[in-house]
Amino acid sequence: MVASTDRLLRELKAGRPEARIGERVVERLIQATGLSAILFILLIFAFLIRESASTFVEVPLGDLLGTRWYPIEAYYGLLPLIFGSVVVTFGAALIALPMGLMTAVFIAEVAPRWAREILKPFVEVLAGIPSVVLGFMGILVLAPVIRTTLNTPTGLTAFTGSLLLAGMALPTIVSVAEDALDAVPRSYRDAALALGATRWQTIWRVTVPAARSGILTAMMLGIGRAIGETMTMLMVTGNAARMPEGLVALFRPVRTMTATIAAEMGEVARGSAHYHVLFTIGLVLFVISFLINLTASIVIFRQARRHQEKVLA
Amino acid sequence: MRVPRQVVQRLGFALLALAAAGVVIPILFIVSYIFYQGIGAISLEFLTEMPRQGMREGGILPAIVGTVLLTLGTGIVAVPVGVGAGIYLAEYARDTALTRAIRLAIINLAGIPSVVYGLFGLGLFVLFLGFGTSILAGSLTLAIMTLPVIISTSEEALRAVPIAFRTVSISLGATRWQTTRRVVLPQALPGILTGVILGLERAAGETAPILFTVAAFFLPRLPGSIFDQTMALPYHLFVISTQVPGMPLRIQYGTALVLLVFVLSMNLLATLIRSYYRRRRQW
């Protein structure tokens, strides 16, 4: 720090002209990098469209909406795959949403300082464990337990996937929801406590409702994360593309959209109908994640603006 | 009969603590179980030799080297672009429609499924630009995936530097770039570094984006150039745990352990940097 300010002072003493060409170039470059995110999102969209476009010529729309996925005989029904993703994500949400919220509330409102200092890095560690390692543990440890306790023919079921997926979505939910709870002004809590509410009542009637948009964002981002997860799905859900037969489907093998792409893209002929359909699945995933994040970001922007207004007032 | 409020609170807090324990205990279990099962496989041979006998013997050197190279490649591309964009958003951008579009794009980039990045890398880098399945194509794909993390953390670190630092520098006659380069950036560096390491940590552990862009199933030699394919630890773990029958468990757990240590030591490094500089910071 000292060295760099010294250099700044020396530069200033040397009295070089302000608008140096080098500086202009650097500032242009920085501006260009600023635009890179927009460039990449457009490029991703463009390439998904480009590689999937001919699907809609090669495969009739009715077939894409069919209930059978069997590419070898040119059955490209996407419904079982979409259904598979929905079932696994639904199961994960049932576990991760309440657990994530409760953990976030515990960290933000209840835990003593020392427990906070331990819990936060732990959640970060969970976020850092590669999905392939979770999938690996799913195959070797979780699946046998599920097979014996649920007495199913295989431990590789949608539910196995849901459990692991919940683990992958939790860090996102916990950290975003915890930020939202932290952002609730102290005065809200103080007012509730001064009125004689217990801390428990304050949490659920004041703090959590005040942070609800942030908590909602956390949940949406967590679900978005779950729908897009690939490797664990490929490894532990059994990969059977079948239509549902009621609630029991949660305990049967399923196949998700992401796992289908990962499993089949390596083996298809480039430019074939199958190849184009796989890109179409990618496009569907892109659109789903775009919608989820668009909604989430609208909430975030609105929050930021409200915060600004509060500061100005 | 009404349950007393204090009892409700006790029970409620216990429930919350239980939920938190439900998050912590599986993590502890996973990490310690992999250590316990995998430590026996770790030897100098395992870390420094080529796989033999259809990967059932020998070491995993090419996968380790591949992951190190991919992580470096990702960093070389993603760090300048990501930090640059962070500087732009924190120091230059005004609140315009364009800036909001950039923020929207960043949030959306962060949410795109990793396998879709893989498809994109295949379409753009491998096929359209003709890089083939190569370290170059894989690094570029991972770099774009890592970008939102690096941009957001850089911006946050830069914004945390108090406005007064900038006002003083500008009032001395420094230009905006001089102020950024000599005053703000050095102050924000630890925060940026933390974000960069966390971003690269994620890239190092990813499998789906490298499936079709760089990863080799079995390639018992080290890559010679950035246009070569390479093995990588996450993909190798996937391969030996699902694709190769009769794989000794010892080797599977050993590979998982090496990957986990690689990734978690980056995590630890980031945490240490953050807490060290947070304590030393004077503002």
Image (cartoon, helix red, strand yellow):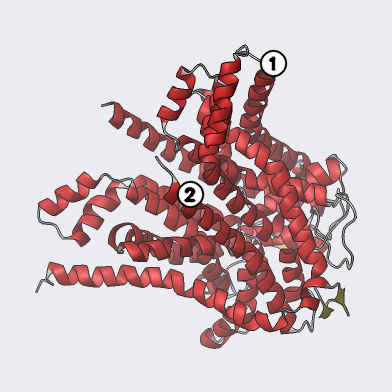
Q: Quadrant of the C terminus of chain A?
A: top left
Q: Are marks 1 and 2 on the same chain?
A: no
Q: The residue marked by circle 2 belongs to what chain?
A: B
* In the image, residue B170 above or below residue B53: above
SS category of the residue bearing label 1 = helix
Image coords of residue A175 (percent x, y)? 44, 54
Check the image and name the residue furthest to the top: A17
- Cα separation between marks 1 and 2: 35 Å
* In the image, residue B44 above or below residue B133: below
Q: Residue at x 22, y 54 (%)?
A: A205
Q: How many marks?
A: 2
Q: Quadrant of residue B151?
A: top right
SS category of the residue bearing label 2 = helix
Question: Residue A197 or B56: which is nearer the viewer?
Answer: B56
Q: Amino acid at mark 1?
A: Ile
Image coords of residue A38 (percent x, y)? 63, 33
Q: Is residue B200 left or right of residue B58?
A: left
Q: Residue at x 45, y 70 (%)?
A: B24
Which residue is label 2 attached to?
Answer: B277
Q: Is residue A110 visible?
A: yes
Image coords of residue A184 (percent x, y)? 29, 46
* In the image, residue A103 above or below residue B103: below
Q: Residue at x 56, y 17 (%)?
A: A13
| Category of crowding for the residue at label 1, using alpha-carbon neighbours closer than 10 angstroms: few (below 14), some (14–19), many (at least 20) | few
Q: Amino acid at mark 2?
A: Tyr
Q: The residue marked by circle 1 belongs to what chain?
A: A
Q: Which mark is residue A21?
A: 1
Q: Residue at x 85, y 52 (%)?
A: B133
Image coords of residue A270 (percent x, y)? 86, 51
Question: Residue A83 or A306: which is nearer the viewer?
Answer: A306
Q: Is residue A154 visible?
A: no
Q: Quadrant of residue B101?
A: top right
